[in-house]
Image (cartoon, grey):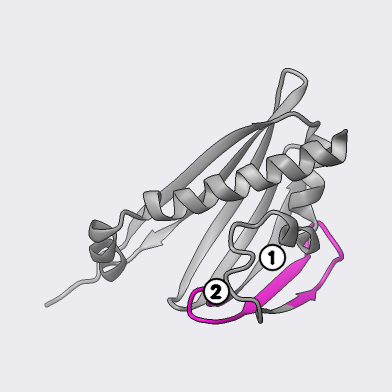
Amino acid sequence: MTTDRVHEFVIERSVLVDAPASTVHGFLDDLHRWTSWSPWEGSDPDLSRTYSGSESGVGASYAWSGNRKAGAGSMTVVDSTDDRVVLDLLFRKPFKATNVTIFLLSPAGSGTEVTWRMTGQQNLVARLVGRIVPMDRFIGRDFEKGLAALKLQAEQQDR
C-alpha cells in the first residue's frame, strides 16, 4: 500500500523599506498594482489577467493564465489590516496547489519591515522534485526579487 504523505512548508523573506506601512500596503492590497513589482511579471508577455471582486482589499481577486513558465491560477485577498495582507493562492498549472500568502508590515525606525510568507502542503512528488531544487531556494529567490522591486516602488512613491 502506497501513501502520499503531505508535509507542510513555509517560505519566508523580508526586506526593510524606507516608506511607511500605508504606502507599502497599497502595493499589496490592490492586486492591480502587483504588475509594478511582482517577480513573475514579464515571464509571459501575452499573459492573460482577469480582475474581479472588490477593487482592492478583502474580496479583490486576480486570475492569470499564461505560458508554461507563468502557468495559471488565482489569488484572492481574504484579510487586510494596517499591518498585514493575507491571500488565498490557487495554482492550476503547471501543478495544482493551494497556498496561503501573508505579507506582514512591521514598523522599523522611519520605515517598514515587510515579510513575505507562503505556507502550504507539499505532496510526495513535490518533495522529491524539491530534493533536486529546494523549494525554499527556488521560490525564495523570486520572493527576494519581488521584495526588492516592491521596496523600489514604495520608496519612489514616498519621495
Q: Which residue range is magenta in the image?
A: 50-72
Choose between 57 and 116: the one closer to the eye.
116
Where, quadrant-wise, is the C terminus in this rendering? top right
- At x 79%, y 31%, the residue is 19
* Residue 88 sits inside the magenta stretch: no
Rendered location of residue 28, percent (x, y): 74, 51
The Cα–Cα distance between marks 1 and 2, rounded to whole angstroms, is: 18 Å
In the picture of the structure, the residue carrying the numbered disc 2 is 70
* Residue 56 sits inside the magenta stretch: yes
Q: Circle 2 sits in a helix, a strand or a loop, which is it?
A: loop
Return the residue found at the far top.
109
Residue 114 falls in which quadrant of the image? top right
- At x 59%, y 57%, the residue is 39
Rendered location of residue 105, percent (x, y): 69, 35
Task: Say the numbered circle drawn on residue 76.
Answer: 1
Nearer the N terminus, badge 1 or badge 2?
2
Choose between 10 and 23: the one closer to the eye.
23
Q: What residue type is disc 1 on?
A: Thr
- At x 45%, y 78%, the residue is 94
- Mark 1 is surrounded, within 10 Å at the Cα level, by few (under 14), some (14 to 19) or many (20 or more) other residues, namely many
Task: Say the numbered circle drawn on residue 6.
Answer: none
Residue 66 falls in which quadrant of the image? bottom right
